[in-house]
């Protein structure tokens, strides 16, 4: 690759930190999110197991003897290591023999079964999760507002510019795939569905050699798309498939397929912020369903930007997915973790960011500026209820991530308003 043309990613700094700390780094994430380009940028030699040259000579060499492909200038990139799982143990053994840091970068677009892998690699091989591009990385956010600053209760108020509603909708449909940035939205919308077809028709089998019902897998994906950004249960997914697609699928199969989707990084669910609140308020334990990128849900639902403009309810869920994709990328860059909050009294918080010092910040996500007042009232009420509980630990920061806002500011009630098109890590 021409490193002068590399588009820098937020994860770059963490990769450099990990290379100085561990003997090897494994960068995981969905196909086409930029893992290979980013890893190549940080490496000094490389080998690609998926290279078809010489009738897949690289993979055959690795299968015969994984040690054969480990020689090269450090850091050495081994792309798609899961194609030959014993590579993991070979790298771990090399790192054990040589105390030098930053020897190898492994990339993987699937998590293989542990069968054939002798050691976890703990302490030797560190894992990093990479995602499609955030709006800031793709150049669609000005980056005038730092999420890290907001989480530490700091903001310089600023006008961030008018937002084109139609362009915002196009960003959802296009997604954060690096290969789509220079395409029209019509062309870019073809990539996610071909991505899913390739993964389901090929990678699902290659992950463990088990043949599965691809038709039912695709039906489950469609059901997940219909329930994007919700806490729908496995039983409800089964019922949804029966009602809307007139197909039966048992709950155990749903569970198995969801695990496969997670191992292939197709899904990227948002865990519940459960005991972290340290309150007697009963909270729900369901994950919030997300695809790795909102464009995957758009492709499965066969929606266009024009179609979404006529379906504001669906658009709202997909906009939430876009924001939560970005919040996860931004928060992880400074040690934060993204959750959601939902209790049995009907109160919800769209996004919760827990910081390394255990403080937490609560964010609502709203597409329209006309929803800001209601969102602020919800956050303030939840904070007040938690403060009433002697065991409660209220959020340190309250904020609203908005689509159609043209300024970043702090309201008189203490709630921040932040346009997603002005946010960065």
Image (cartoon, rainbow, N blue to C red):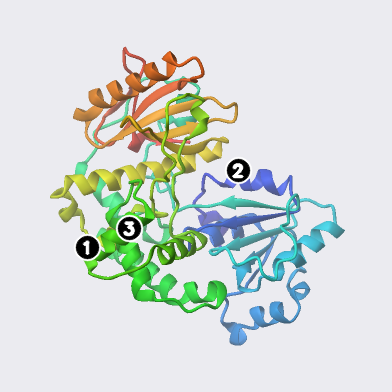
Left/right placement of residue 345 relative to residue 304 reads right
Q: What kind of element bears circle 1?
A: helix
Say left or right for 100 vs 80.
right
| Residue at the spot 66% in from the left edge and 79% down from the top edge | 58
Q: Nearer the viewer, residue 160 or 391?
A: 391
> Is tag 3's residue or tag 1's residue first in the polypeptide sequence?
3
Label 2 vs 1, first from the N-terminus: 2
Q: Position of residue 388 (x, y in %)?
A: 42, 14
**Picture coordinates of residue 287 (x, y %)?**
42, 46
Q: Residue at x 43, y 39 (%)?
A: 327
Residue 309: percent from left, percent from top: 16, 49
Residue at 22 percent of width and 63 percent of height: 243
Q: Which residue is mark 3?
A: 237
Q: Which residue is mark 1?
A: 243
The foreground one among 116 and 410 is 116
Other-residue count near label 1 (Cα within 10 Å), few / some / many at <14 / 14–19 / ≥20: few
- Numbered disc 3: secondary structure: helix
Residue closest to the far right: 97
Position of 34 relative to 354 (above/below): below
* CA neighbours of label 3 inside 10 A, class few (<14), some (14 to 19), many (20+): many
> What is the CA distance from the residue labelled 2 to the residue labelled 1?
47 Å
Disc sitting over residue 13 in the figure = 2
| Above or below, comparing residue 367 to residue 266 in the picture | above
């Amino acid at each position: 690759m021409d490193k002068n043309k590399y588009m820098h990613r937020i994860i770059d700094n963490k990769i450099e930190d990990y290379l100085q700390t561990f003997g090897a780094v494994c960068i995981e994430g969905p196909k086409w999110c930029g893992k290979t380009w980013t890893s190549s940028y940080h490496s000094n030699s490389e080998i690609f197991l998926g290279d078809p040259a010489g009738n897949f000579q690289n993979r055959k060499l690795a299968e015969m003897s994984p040690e054969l492909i480990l020689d090269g200038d450090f850091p050495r990139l081994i792309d798609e290591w899961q194609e030959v799982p014993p590579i993991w143990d070979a790298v771990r053994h090399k790192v054990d023999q040589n105390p030098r840091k930053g020897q190898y970068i492994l990339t993987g677009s699937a998590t293989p079964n542990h069968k054939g892998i002798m050691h976890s690699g703990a302490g030797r091989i560190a894992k990093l999760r990479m995602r499609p591009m955030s709006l800031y990385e793709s150049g669609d956010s000005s980056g005038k507002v730092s999420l890290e600053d907001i989480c530490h209760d700091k903001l310089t108020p600023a006008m961030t510019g008018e937002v084109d509603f139609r362009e915002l909708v196009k960003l959802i449909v296009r997604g954060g795939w690096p290969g789509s940035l220079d395409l029209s939205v019509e062309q870019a919308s073809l990539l996610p569905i071909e991505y899913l077809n390739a993964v389901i028709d090929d990678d699902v089998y290659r992950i463990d050699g088990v043949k599965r019902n691809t038709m039912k897998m695709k039906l489950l994906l469609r059901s997940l798309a219909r329930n994007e950004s919700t806490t729908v249960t496995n039983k409800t997914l089964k019922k949804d498939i029966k009602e809307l697609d007139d197909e039966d699928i048992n709950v155990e199969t749903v569970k198995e397929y969801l695990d496969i989707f997670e191992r292939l990084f197709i899904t990227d669910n948002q865990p519940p912020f459960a005991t972290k609140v340290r309150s007697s308020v009963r909270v729900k334990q369901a994950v919030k369903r997300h695809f790795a990128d909102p464009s995957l849900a758009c492709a499965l639902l066969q929606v266009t930007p024009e179609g979404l403009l006529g379906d504001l309810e669906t658009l709202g869920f997909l906009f939430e997915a876009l924001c939560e994709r970005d919040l996860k990328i931004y928060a992880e860059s400074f040690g934060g973790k993204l959750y959601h909050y939902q209790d049995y009294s009907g109160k919800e918080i769209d996004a919760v960011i827990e910081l390394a010092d255990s403080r937490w910040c609560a964010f609502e996500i709203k597409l329209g500026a006309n929803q800001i007042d209601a969102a602020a009232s919800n956050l303030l009420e939840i904070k007040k209820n938690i403060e009433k509980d002697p065991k409660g630990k209220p959020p340190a920061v309250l904020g609203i991530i908005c689509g159609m806002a043209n300024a970043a500011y702090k309201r008189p009630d203490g709630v921040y308003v932040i346009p997603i098109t002005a946010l960065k890590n």
